Amino acid sequence: MIASPQFTALPKSFWACVRYISQKGGYTDRATGEVKAYDLESIRNLLQPFEIPPEHLASHQPMDVLLQAYFRYRAAALNDRIRWLLMDRAEAQQLFQKLQEELQPQCPIPHNKQKGEKAGPAYLTGIVNMLIEANLKNLPVDYNPLQLPTIAAGKALQRTLSRRYDGCFPSVNNPIALWEIKEYYHTTTFGSRVADGIYETLLDGMELEEARRSKQRNIQHLLIVDSHFTWWVCGRSYLCRLVDMLNMGYVDEVLFGKEVLDRLPIIAEAWTQAYRQQYPLQE
């Protein structure tokens, strides 16, 4: 999923309203279990303690009207599409085994951190690694960076990012793309570890945004998530925050479950073109 052009480049005050309304009115409808789409009356009532900015935005829509459009967009994206892309453990295992048989991968296939019967391959990470390898052909990829990514101009070090990522293309030094993978097939509740992952991604996005603004280096930032139970059954409010974060510009694309099958080949093609421009003599 990529951001909607209608909701990009909006002021911080817009996103302050989105968060406030979501907090006060709730992210989901308890009766239906679906994500809420607020109407104008509800938006105005919930924002009563504050003055809604009267000026029109770049879209020439009043703030409350654009808020209504955003809540409808967010609800439709999650209720009608994203919930059905998320896999459970058995489905992810089946897809993993199918790709492993078809692609005969040479890339690393890490194991999860579970014990006993739950121990085994990290299915989503394995799926992502296999698809990237298959679509990037022989280009370099760091599937398990154990270093902080760096940004340099020549020999001048400009930025060292704060966290290690799950993957970098082509390397941690001046990466073209960075990605994080969050699979929670074995969890039974939406715990603090899952919530912390969302906030880490937000902070990563802020850091990359600053690097983009100050040094004009555009590093693609991907977030790849899965587990229908964890994200949809237990964590719908956090799915809403992912969609918010995406449209705020703090992550370039969020891939939900099975979406990796369609999107990663397209993304890898764009990476290949970027690599050829950046390293024309290294293929």
Image (cartoon, helix red, strand yellow):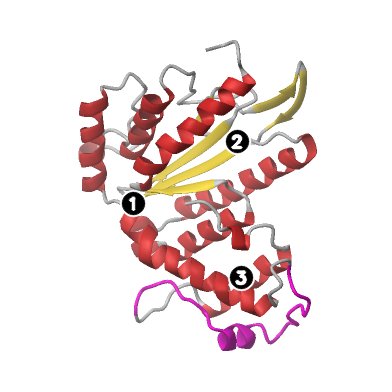
- Residue type pointed to by label 2: Arg
Local secondary structure at mark 1? loop
Q: Which residue is drawn at the image coordinates 76% and 42% (left, top)? A: 213
Local secondary structure at mark 2? loop
Q: At which x and y percent is residue 155? A: 76, 15
Q: Is residue 119 left or right of residue 214?
A: left
Q: At which x and y percent is residue 269? A: 47, 31
Q: Is residue 77 left or right of residue 46?
A: left
Which label number is shown at residue 18?
3
Local secondary structure at mark 3? helix
- Residue type pointed to by label 3: Val
Q: Which residue is drawn at the image coordinates 55% and 27% (left, top)? A: 273
Mark closer to the chain start, 2 or 3: 3
Mark closer to the chain start, 2 or 1: 2
Task: Give the mark toward the camera: 2 or 3.
Answer: 3
Give the residue pinned by disc 2.
163
- Residue type pointed to by label 1: Ser
Q: Give the residues in magenta.
A: 32-57
Q: Which residue is drawn at the image coordinates 52% and 33% (left, top)? A: 270
Crowd class of label 2 (few under 14; some 14 to 19; many from 20; radius 10 Å)? some
